[in-house]
Amino acid sequence: MTQVELNTPRILHVDDDDDIRAITQIALEVVGKLEVHQCASGQEALLVAAEFTPDLFLLDVMMPGMTGEDTLAALRRMPGMENTPVIFMTAKAQADDVARLMSLGSAKVITKPFDPLTLATKVVEIWQQQQITAAP
């Protein structure tokens, strides 16, 4: 699915790891043709979120300073971001970790390492399912 096709999200991706951001950018922008704004920290995400107006948050869980959960809580307090779908990406994908993230409202938890060739398709499918679920 490409950005020119209807029903694709603008993604705010937050991860403190330079390599993960680079791979994710290639996977989402080059392979998936999606619009992505990347941030290296939760604090940076809070500074750009209102102007970027994302349709989807793609958040790392373990980050210094603000964790992914902290970042999500702060984003949720911003006007217009209260119901923005979120996908967490983490290397810690034990059942209790996934359950905790899902209880925060995550649409899905993607385990690192992920397949860069299928990431964009997976993210768009999850986002589209959230749109169907949220429809009146």
Image: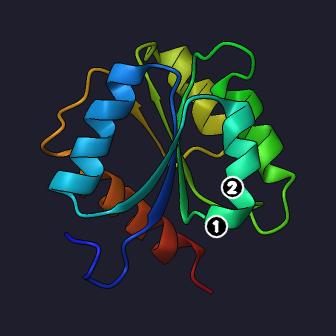
Residue 104 visible:
no
**Whole-percent x, y for residue 130 in the image:** 49, 65
Q: Quadrant of the N terminus?
A: bottom left
Q: Nearer the viewer, residue 64 or 126?
A: 64
**Whole-percent x, y for residue 133 in the image:** 52, 71
Secondary structure beneath dot 1 equals loop
| Real-space CA distance between mark 1 and mark 2, rounded to the nearest whole angstrom | 6 Å
Residue at 31 percent of width and 61 percent of height = 125
- Residue identified by numbered label 1: 53
Q: Is residue 44 left or right of residue 58?
A: right
**How busy is the neighbourhood of tag 2: few (under 14 within 10 Å), some, or many (20 plus)?**
some
Q: Is residue 22 left or right of residue 74?
A: left
Vertical relation: 32 (above or below) 60 = below
**How busy is the neighbourhood of tag 1: few (under 14 within 10 Å), some, or many (20 plus)?**
some
Residue 41 visible:
yes
| Disc marking residue 26 | none
Q: Are marks 1 and 2 in contact (CB under 8 Å)?
A: yes
| Disc marking residue 49 | 2
Residue at 26 percent of width and 32 percent of height = 23
**Whole-percent x, y for residue 81 in the image:** 74, 61
Residue at 43 percent of width and 17 percent of height = 93
Residue at 22 percent of width and 44 percent of height = 27
Secondary structure beneath dot 2 equals helix
Q: Is residue 81 left or right of residue 8?
A: right
State the image quarter where residue 53 is shown. Answer: bottom right
Name which residue type carries label 1. Answer: Thr
